Amino acid sequence: MPVTLRLPTVLAGAAGGNTVHQARGATVGDVVADVASRYPELGTRLRGPNGEPYPYVIFYLDDEDIRFRQGFATPVRDGAEIVVVPAIAGG
Amino acid sequence: MAIGRDVSKLPGLGNDEILRYSRHLIIPEVGMEGQRRLKDARVLMVGAGGLGSPIGLYLAAAGVGRLGIVEFDTVDVTNLQRQVLHGTRDVGRKKVESARDRIRDVNPHVEVVPHEAWLTSENALQIIGQYDLVVDGTDNFPTRYLVNDACVLLGKPNVYGSIFRFEGQSTVFCAADGPCYRCLYPEPPPPGLVPSCAEGGVLGILPGLIGLVQATEAVKLVTGVGRPLVGRLLLLDALAMQFRTMTLRKDPACPACGTREIQALVDYQQFCGVGREEDLSGIPAISVSELDARRRGGSPLDLVDVRERHEWEIGRIAGARLAPLSSFAEALRSFDSARDTVLYCKSGVRSAKAVQQLQAAGFRRVWNLEGGILRWSEEIDPTVPRY
């Protein structure tokens, strides 16, 4: 069963206009890499040149911040949901 | 637990106030004590824009005794689609004055304290220090980090909200043992990566939804009612009309609220890289009057609009063709390097990038229209709509 990667609309433009993506992978990083392989521009918005998340883009795995688990190495279960929450500043 | 003074020191309510707030007073959780706490509360709104509008209106109506407003902007007609604190007749007025007048009408018992200034590292501690809590309705990263650090240093709760297009976030930072903004986002995105509402747009209703979450949290903090939005990040997706709450943890390594190595306010423009944006000054440019003269003189040139299609549909310069920057690489083969080419966008930033792309592809006869379609509308053809 695939994993769901949910993007905010600000990143949808880099992902074929879609906010919800099905992907596969054993870890959060694998899932991100799977989606990024389809949308290279999205890949550069989700992770830096070192392959790690940016400090201004947070990944939640089933509502938990992956920084307090194992980052991109955090294992994902089948059917899990990853939500991407980038910093926005509008007011 | 409510913030503020011991109940014995709270001000009383006059009979006119008791009548005005009767629908609060008959809620047992609020009651006379809660309403007196609201009257005693000193709340600082940073920003009287999209978020600040519902925050100001509802906190005033709820009976917050002193409402400070930090705002330096004036009311622009493009604000009115969402900034309901200001009206059509206020266009051109200072927002602090417009807000004060509107709030006085909503509730004359509220003392409005205008701070007509930008919040800076020099004035933030002095201004915020006069209040019990801050409601952050700013529209840029440097001020958000500034508000956060000042609130951490002063130990004031910071009711946070931010919005973009159809999505919003809210939480309460800097409460006792709670996380702060730097725990959530240790560093800001590079300038230009995340568009502002002015650049990217925002659904006018969205600040209403998020601003009222903030106002609700402010009232809860003041009265001590309920479970505050501390350690939880509320996310709103208005398109799906879905509210989600994520766990937000205090980061022990946070330099502001964790290790406390941040002992004083810093230069937040520098921290956020503002002013280090790409230098576009070396790019060949043409003024709107030069372009107008060349067109009137009949000299052949290609005029290309690099905005997105939904902007093109708002209005365009006659004779232009569309080649959006988002798919510019694919459009490169449609350009003729032998012809003079002028590129424009809304204000001249995106078209400068497009000129650079053409230069990189070997084009030599390309120019950026300074000030974009906005300046064309202002100086040459007022029938072209501004937006």
Image (cartoon, rainbow, N blue to C red):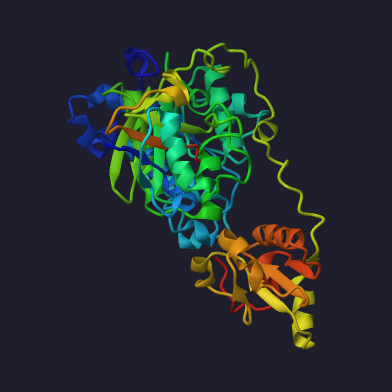
Q: Position of residue B318 (x, y in %)?
A: 62, 81
Q: Quadrant of residue B198?
A: bottom right
Residue B242 in the image: above or below residue B249 = below
Image point (46%, 58%), residue name: B80
Image point (30%, 21%), residue name: B224
Residue B89 in the image: above or below residue B238 = below
Residue B82 in the image: above or below residue B285 = above
Q: Determine if residue B269 is in view.
A: yes
Q: Position of residue B377 (x, y in %)?
A: 64, 73
Answer left or right for B44 relative to B300: left
Q: Position of residue A21 (x, y in %)?
A: 36, 45
Answer left or right for B367 relative to B221: right
Image quarter in which the N terminus of chain B is found = top left
Image point (80%, 75%), residue name: B290
Which one is in front, A74 or B157? Answer: A74
Q: Determine if residue B107 is in view.
A: no
Q: Quadrant of residue B387?
A: bottom right
